Amino acid sequence: HGVVVEQVLGTASVRDLMVPEPTFMPADEPVERAIDDYFLRLGYGGFPVARDGEVEGLITLAQIKECPPEDRTHHSEPA
């Protein structure tokens, strides 16, 4: 397993793969808008969530997919 990962990633470090200037999602963003304005538009698998300039958590595409469509007009909640 480790050999496969090494073959795929080589000697890359987290710094080499990170997004240097991440886009923060407002904590009160409705899930519906998060899908359109963040996940579809920017294409990342997750976003840090902030309120008043402070990071509260992370919201991922996997969490978004678990949210029933009828609940997507409600606000997002960080993990």
Image: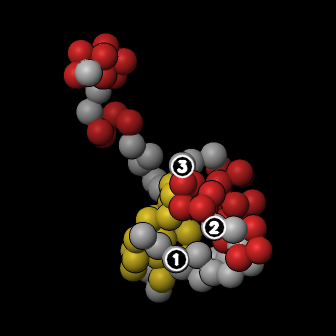
Tell me the residue that label 3 is attached to: 45
Q: Quadrant of residue 55?
A: bottom left
Placement of 64 over or under 15, stated as above or below: below
Question: Which comes sooner in the sequence, label 2 or label 1?
Answer: 2
Report the residue that reaches farthest toward the bottom. 52
> Any mark on residue 67, and which?
2
The answer to whether residue 1 is left or right of residue 71 is left
Identify residue type, mark 2. Answer: Cys
Q: Is residue 69 above or below residue 5?
A: below
- Residue 41, above or below 14: below
Q: Amino acid at mark 1?
A: Glu
Residue appearing at x 75%, y 67% in the figure: 69
Q: Are marks 3 and 1 in contact (CB under 8 Å)?
A: no
Q: Which residue is mark 1?
A: 77
Q: Mark 1: which secondary structure? A: loop
Left or right? Give the position of 58 relative to 4. right
Q: CA distance from mark 2 to mark 1?
A: 11 Å
Image mark for residue 56: none
Q: Secondary structure at mark 2?
A: loop
Q: How is the image coloured?
A: secondary structure
